[in-house]
Image (tube, rainbow, N blue to C red):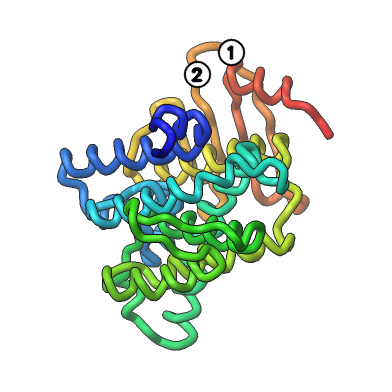
Amino acid sequence: MGKPLIYEIWEKPATSCVIAICSLIWFYIQKKGIGYSHVGLNYDTALEGHHWRIITSAFSHISILHLVFNMSALWSLGIIEQLGNLGLGVEYYLHYTMLLVVLSGLLVLGMYHILINKFRIDYFRRVTAVGYSCVVFGWMTILSTKQPSSKLELFGFLSLPISFAPFESLVFTSIIVPQASFIGHLSGIIVGYAIAWGVIHGMTNYWAVSMLGWIVLVFIFSLKKSGKYNFSFLKIESVEDSSLPSVRFLSSGNGRTLRMSASDGSRLHQVTFTSYFEMILLSWPCQ
């Protein structure tokens, strides 16, 4: 008899939170009738500045089968949180999950760019990717390298040797779910190997928090720029060069204004921070 579910959740806190978030987002998508075009990652929309889709596409699922497959695989991969003795563990899991989300999304767009512009395959302009599969395939790859003796449990009855799981699952999902993103899954595998082999390494709490801050900023700015959401506290204005916008945080109180100009003096950028953002910046540790 296996462990009670509550103990499994306690042993896999980060995995459990991700599964809860993805499930709640799926429920919201179904309730509001949201489709691929609203949250998915697409080449043309990325060119239009919808960079926020790298994040929303990763945590969104339209099909219940897609959600169940990804979350079932992710639950099995949650063993990574318990492998602190191998240099993994909860902290490692959180750090590199963030990297997998961002880097696999960027790699997908890079592959689309090459296929569209180099090989003239316009089909990929119409492809819209959603789902946590990139991250799942990335963790499959990392675990297959760090602990090749592990097993990947799917749906509670299907067991795959983890050493072959990334490529077995790549073929399996392509057959069972033909509309699944082969490019997305392959991107997750590539980033996973880069992390497992130490090509991408050195994530610490400091760098993780810094990266999270930049992700939040880019997410907010791209949402604002794309017109999908209106942040009343944020205003983006054009200056002399329309391709280089100034950024201003508006506040009713007093703030500190920082002016920066390019070396040729032809462009001027103004950033006004409210006392809240000023406090964060002044308290940030220097290294």
> Residue visible at 73% across and 20% down?
283
Task: Indicate the quadrant where residue 141 lies.
Answer: bottom right
Quadrant showing the C terminus: top right
Left or right side of 252 for 145: right
Please identify the residue farthest to the top as the structure is shown: 253
> Residue visible at 46% across and 34% down?
8
Please identify the residue farthest to the bottom as the structure is shown: 119
Q: Amino acid at mark 2?
A: Ser
Please identify the residue farthest to the front as the structure is shown: 1
> Residue visible at 21% across and 53% down?
35
Left or right side of 202 for 126: left
Residue 174 against residue 145 in the figure, above or below:
below
Q: Which structural element holds mark 2?
A: loop
Quadrant showing the N terminus: top left
User: Where does residue 170 sit, x and y in percent of width and height?
Assistant: 42, 71
User: Where does residue 200 sit, x and y in percent of width and height?
Assistant: 70, 58
How far, Cα to Cα, is label 1 from label 2? 7 Å
Left or right side of 11 for 69: left
Task: Indicate the quadrant where residue 25 lies.
Answer: top left
User: Where does residue 240 sit, x and y in percent of width and height?
Assistant: 56, 49
Q: Amino acid at mark 1?
A: Asn
Q: Circle 1 is placed at which residue position?
A: 254
Determine whether label 1 and label 2 are within 8 Å by CB: yes
Q: Circle 2 is placed at which residue position?
A: 251
